Image: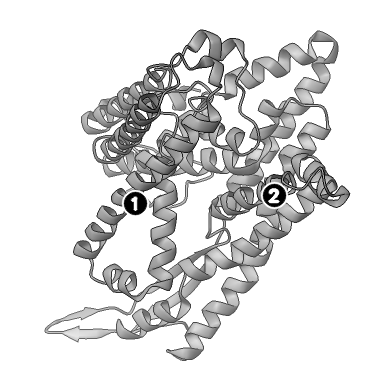
Amino acid sequence: MKKFVETIKNIFSIEELRTRILNTIGFLIIFRIGSFVVLPGVDPVILSELGGEASGIFSFINTFLGGAFSRASIFALGIMPYISASIVLQLMTVAVPYFQKLQKEGDSGRKKINQLTRFLTIGICMVQGFSYVSAAIEPQAIINNTFFFKISSVMILTSGTIFCMWLGEKITDKGIGNGISMLIMIGIISQFPGSILAEVVTRGLSEALILILEFVALFFVVLVTVALVQAVRRVPVQYAKQVVGNKVYGGQRQYIPLKVNASGVMPIIFAQSIMFLPAMLAGLWREQSDFANYIGTTFSDFTSWQYNLTFAIMIIVFTFFYTAITINPNQIADDMKRNGGFVPGVKPGKQTADFLDNILSRITLPGSIFLAIIAILPAFAMIAGMNQGFAQFYGGTSLLIMVGVILDTLQQIESYLLMRHYEGMMKSGRVKGRTQAA
């Protein structure tokens, strides 16, 4: 405890780091305040009385937005349209030659892609904003449901998303951590205290032992998630020595860190989005077909074995797919060959690419299986009797995002401390990316 207090003092003794942390806190407070500002023309009292809790895909989005979606806030769409646009552009850089060319142009290409991402975000905001105003807000809570209300609300929601994008960029530039990820994380964490309180009230003193076991189980789930996020397979790379003038360059052994879970939370997001389709489509023919009724009922139940088995298989498939489009062994092998690097015992070129592809396949399979297990853990938690709000922190996208963002933020804080020869936040159990202090 004494070392922890000393580390906190060291953090706030570094002026730049202290300023960045305070800036981050300030920007996050602005984001949370905005999530409680209701759209003009919506009665928040009636909305709360109607108990407008989001369900289905809306519940999934509401989790990321800290409840702003169900409150009909000006930040009801949050940063999600920007993330959707980023995913679309990322996929297009793999499939469309024009975007592949932009990606290889360096800073100018990235600026062009970022500009296109922003334009696409505005388009997505308009479509999602109109759908949100038309379908997600309870009609009784709208004071004057006119066409002008819908148009003005769409403009406000679009402006709210653009403002969230600006906040995210400011956190990245002036604060600590990745701004977009921090906004999502703070929205998820904001629901954690309420979920704990609801679980404690539900269990009561008569089930205190069960409550303790739940927290112990949550602790070990977090440990496993951290291990999955941090696990890497280091491939040794040797660089040939080069003599330039009187100096010798190269000759050092480095490593290519291939992550066991290189795809992050994207497979879960893709699979989660598709898993809502069977129930939605079955609802169209539920009255005419018993099979459609069965599909709709089964895939509306997040705890059914059919839902979770399909969900797990889709996560495994999407993990391989997303890893394949984000990591290109041929490009890595070509870059190594161009810079005079080689994997010991493997010929440069095609054999190196095949070697890296073989390693990726071997580590992605167990990584995808563990990712699928973590994704379906909330269903087992609900089966065990936990409330849905508390159970969602036992795995899935929420837990992976929180762990990933917190670890990334700790790495940045570590780098500031080590540059000034202070001991880092984790002396034992070093955070990945930490280097030895000089």
Q: Nearer the viewer, residue 428 or 258?
A: 258
When the figure is inspected, residue 190 is found, relative to residue 260, above or below; the finding is above
Q: Position of residue 65 (x, y in %)?
A: 49, 31
Give the image's coloring scheme.
one colour
- Considering only order in the chain, which callout, 2 or 1, is on the residue closer to the N terminus? 1
When the figure is inspected, residue 23 is found, relative to residue 182, above or below; the finding is above
When the figure is inspected, residue 26 is found, relative to residue 337, above or below; the finding is above
> Which residue is found at the position 42% from the left and 43% from the top?
127
Q: Position of residue 40 (x, y in %)?
A: 37, 17
- Extreme residue in the left direction: 245
Q: Nearer the viewer, residue 227 or 194?
A: 194
Q: Nearer the viewer, residue 135 or 230?
A: 135
Which disc, if any, is residue 396? Answer: none
**SS category of the residue bearing label 2:** helix
Which disc, if any, is residue 281? Answer: 2
> Which residue is found at the position 53% from the left and 66% from the top?
323
| Of labels 1 and 2, the one closer to you | 2
Q: Is 316 placed left or right of 191 in the picture? A: right
> Which residue is found at the position 52% from the left and 28% from the top?
189
**SS category of the residue bearing label 1:** helix
Q: Nearer the viewer, residue 274 or 348?
A: 274
Q: Which residue is mark 1?
A: 120
Going by the numbered disc 1, the residue's amino acid type is Leu
Q: Is 173 placed left or right of 31 in the picture? A: left
Going by the numbered disc 2, the residue's amino acid type is Leu
Q: Is 100 placed left or right of 227 in the picture? A: left
Q: Position of residue 299 (x, y in %)?
A: 76, 45
Q: Is residue 179 visible?
A: yes
Task: Check contact, mark 1 vs mark 2: CB within 8 A.
Answer: no
